[in-house]
Image: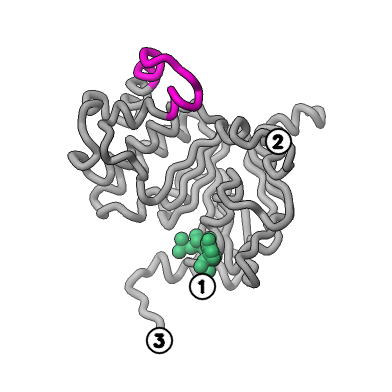
Amino acid sequence: MSTAAAESDIAVQVTDLHKSFGPVEVLRGIDLKVRRGEVVCIIGPSGSGKSTLLRCVNVLEEPTAGTVVVDGVELTDPDVDIDAARRKIGMVFQSFNLFSHLNVMNNLTVAQRKVLKRSREDAEKTGLANLERVGLAGRENAMPAQLSGGQQQRVAIARALSMDPDVMLFDEPTSALDPELVGDVLGVMRRLADEGMTMLVVTHEMQFAREVADKVLFMDAGVVVEEGPPEQVIGKPREERTRTFLSRVLNPTHVDQ
Ligand SMILES: Nc1ncnc2c1ncn2[C@@H]1O[C@H](COP(=O)(O)OP(=O)(O)OP(=O)(O)O)[C@@H](O)[C@H]1O
């Protein structure tokens, strides 16, 4: 493969990324590469910087140093049209963030119409197709409060998909859900992965990471401690810090002394 072809195969490239909040350095030199069609899961203890990394990837947080390149566009370049570049990135948060006063269809169409300037007809057509994709066809007139948390999260995924993103970022998309609703959301994410969507997922769902990820990154204290295929990082971790973390999350009854 030529260098140019190899580079165009890369959807997200993060190089030597640092982020500080005041005196506290939360990210301390992160390198990350996501190829097109790849699912990369980021795991690690609370406070290790996973969400901050994801937020730096679409520049919701401004990195202190380092570069973020998405689809060949450097988002950390001050001269780049950041709004245009960010349109290629869909983001799904822990807390769905739907507009509570808008029904499902209007939640799906508002950004399409405002940002992409789509006609109402086009926006609704795209919205319906994506509602179907997340298994919620027929619920377009429901208000968010009439839906379960899992259904609301699936609407949030449909909303992000309606902007035709090249890359989807998920920040602990199931951690605000009752346990019985987690499976539906993970099922939708699994299908997206099967469809070839490029996905960067911060998650505590080890089974999902194990079964769906092409690559897993274990982060601790602002650095990537270990990365590789899930069967290595989760199945046979090389680093003591990874083993300690995994023994805690895989044995949740463990209580720290
Ligand atoms: N806006 C902010 N201002 C100051 N400190 C922040 C800010 N955002 C994050 N932090 C701090 O950065 C550290 C990393 O937070 P982050 O949310 O990225 O971790 P995380 O690994 O995603 O944790 P969790 O799994 O609990 O969500 C934490 O100590 C947090 O308090």
Secondary structure type for disc 2? loop
Going 45% across and 53% down the picture, which residue do you hit? Answer: 203
The residue pinned by badge 1 equals 244
The residue pinned by badge 3 equals 257
Q: Residues within 10 Å of mark 2 (few under 14, many from 20)?
A: few
Mark sitting earlier along the chain (3/1): 1
Separation of residues labelled 3 and 2 (CA atoms): 50 Å
Mark sitting earlier along the chain (2/1): 2
| The C terminus lies in quadrant | bottom left
Mark sitting earlier along the chain (3/2): 2
Q: Is mark 2 within 8 Å of ligand 1?
A: no
Q: Residue furthest left?
A: 146
Q: How many marks?
A: 3
| The N terminus lies in quadrant | top right
Q: Is residue 207 left or right of residue 68?
A: left
The residue pinned by badge 2 equals 80
Which residue is at the front of the view, 53 or 141?
141
Separation of residues labelled 2 and 1 (CA atoms): 41 Å
The amino acid pointed to by label 1 is Thr
Q: Is residue 144 left or right of residue 79?
A: left
Q: Quick check: 4 above or below 189?
A: above
